[in-house]
Image (cartoon, rainbow, N blue to C red):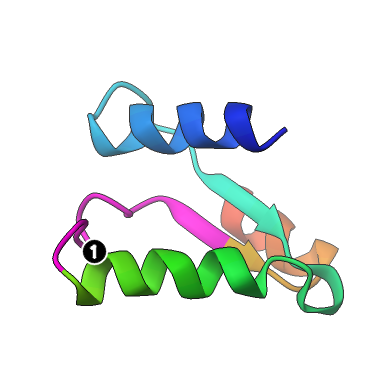
Amino acid sequence: TLEEVSEIMSKLSLGQLQVPCIYYNLDGYYDDIKHFLQQMIAKGFSSEEKQQGVYFAESLEKIKELLK
C-alpha cells in the first residue's frame, strides 16, 4: 500500500534501512509519484540524499539489477 511504501521511504531517508525501495513502474503506472518526488526536491522539501535508495524500474530485469 502507499502507506507501507511511505514508511519504507521514511526509514531509508532516516538511515534506518539499508535496502532499496523499488517501484515497479510498469507502463508508467508510478510516473506521478516519481514526478512528485522530483518536485519535492525542486521545491526544497526533500533532497537527493534523502531519496537515495528509491528507484523506479520499468522491467523485472532492471529490478534484478537493482537488487544485486
Residues packed near mark 1 inside 10 Å, few (<14), some (14 to 19) or many (20 plus): some
Residue type of the residue flagged with mark 1: Glu
Element type at mark 1: loop
Q: Is residue 37 left or right of residue 4?
A: left
The reply, left or right, for residue 42 in relation to residue 20 is left
Secondary structure predominantly adopted by residues drawn in magenta: loop
Would residue 2 appear left or right of 58 to someone viewing this image?
left
Q: Which residues are magenta?
A: 44-55
8 vs 3, nearest the viewer: 3
Residue 38 at what x, y percent from top left?
A: 37, 73
Residue in view at x 70 percent, y 68 percent: 62
Is residue 54 part of the magenta span, yes or no? Answer: yes
Number of marks in picture: 1
Task: From the top left corner, tell me how far across and down residue 48 is, in percent.
Answer: 23, 64
Residue 51: in magenta span: yes
- Farthest residue toward the top? 16
Where residue 23 sits in the image (x, y, percent)? 66, 55
Q: From the viewer's side, name the closer residue of 35 and 8.
A: 35
Q: Which residue is mark 1?
A: 48
Residue at 32% x, 54% y is 52
Q: Nearer the viewer, residue 34 or 12?
A: 34
For residue 30, side relative to residue 27 (left or right): left
| x and y percentages locating residue 6 in the rendered image | 50, 35
Q: Which residue is located at x 72 percent, y 32 percent?
A: 1
Establish if 11 lies above or below 57: above
Q: Quadrant of residue 12?
A: top left
**As rendered, which of 22 and 42 lies closer to the eye?**
42
Q: Quadrant of residue 63?
A: bottom right
Up the image or down, 4 lies above or below 65; here it is above
Q: Is residue 57 visible?
A: yes
